[in-house]
Amino acid sequence: MIAGRPLRVAFAGDATRFAAWVPGGVSDAAADGDPRRSLAATFVDTRGAAPAAVGAALAAARPDVVVALGVAEHDGQVLNECRAPVLGVVVPPDRPPAWVLRAAAPGQPPDAAALAAAAAHERARLWAPGSPGEACDRLVALDPIDAVGARLWRTIAPPVDDGLFAPVASARRPPRIVFAGPSTEHRERWLAPATHLHDVRHVAHGVTPDRLKRLLEDVDVALVAHASGRATFDHRVALHLAAGHLVLTEPLRPRHGLEPGIDLVEVADPDALARLLGAIRASPDLLRRARVRGRLKAERFKASHVWGRVLTDFLRDVRAQRTRPLV
């Protein structure tokens, strides 16, 4: 809270990827009830928007803090011109770069060395002079591997809009199984046996904010697969747990406090996934305990709580070092 009012935060990013990361409206952020962490959030959708339009929208919001979600996709000059301090959120792309895919043998995934080289290239581009990363006062990520260690201020828990949390509902018969995410070769291989044997709905394109809540209400079992062979933490895991779904995912790294076999189920083998889905379809309540525990654990991911704590610390840290003028 600033001068008796909530902290004004302008979140900027592609709404199809990041609307679910943002607390709606004015929220009392802290679990401990600390009023200093109350947030008034504004979302600036950067999809297809010219940099000048994004800059004008940010200026009109008159924020105390700007949060650049998926910072690599932002315009460095726009972030530099913000009068408020800027927190950049580093998020890996939804699919490997096209040049890495072209370099792979036909029908084969990119090898580990090519993926590592692509990640290093993207990180170097993010920190280059005039880049959006350089324009930020601090950088955070869900996974520390997504940022160069010296530039990464901290890792954060995956934030989920408080309005998307829901109680665990009774499983439908048959259960409704969904995978949401763009197609990649790795994902297609991991899902192939499951989609061949079971009715799995694949939402391949970005879900707009107005459709997201309805989609989540129509899911019992959520599948989560990495974009490539690299294990990471997919934000969709937190989103599905918050919505009360049973989550079946490739192994996660980091796990942000989630416990495999208790809060969710990690499945490394595509055939094992297909067999597990067969058992769940035969007995929809087979893993209900994991569904309930996962929903309870998701409370730590409420966006108002996550951003309230992070932004309070961020402002304190930036003010102490005076790295840029503050309003």
Image (cartoon, helix red, strand yellow):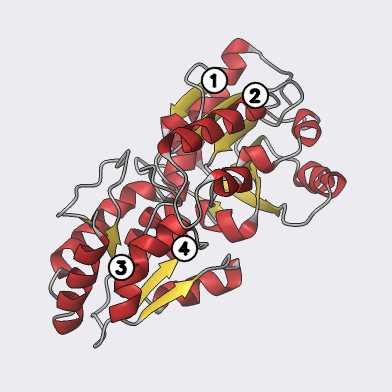
In terms of sequence position, does the residue under pointer 1 or pointer 3 come before the other? 1
Please, what is the three-letter code of the amino acid marked with disc 3?
Answer: His
Front position among marks 2 and 3:
2
Residue 288 position in % (x across, y down): 16, 70
Categorize mark 3 by other alpha carbons within 10 Å: few (<14), some (14-19), many (20+): many
Mark number, residue 163: 4
Please, what is the three-letter code of the amino acid marked with disc 1?
Answer: Arg
Could you tell whether 275 is left or right of 325 in the image? left
Residue 289 position in % (x across, y down): 14, 65
Seen from this angle, which residue lies furthest bottom?
A: 173
In terms of sequence position, does the residue under pointer 2 or pointer 3 come before the other? 2
- Which residue is painted at 80% across and 41% down in the image? 59
Distance CA(mark 4)–CA(mark 1)? 32 Å
Q: Give SS at disc 3.
A: loop
- Residue to which mark 3 is pinned: 245
- Residue to which mark 2 is pinned: 127
In terms of sequence position, does the residue under pointer 4 or pointer 3 come before the other? 4
Front position among marks 2 and 4:
2
Seen from this angle, which residue lies furthest right?
A: 52
Categorize mark 1 by other alpha carbons within 10 Å: few (<14), some (14-19), many (20+): some
In terms of sequence position, does the residue under pointer 4 or pointer 1 come before the other? 1
Q: Mark 2 touching mark 3, by CB under 8 A? A: no
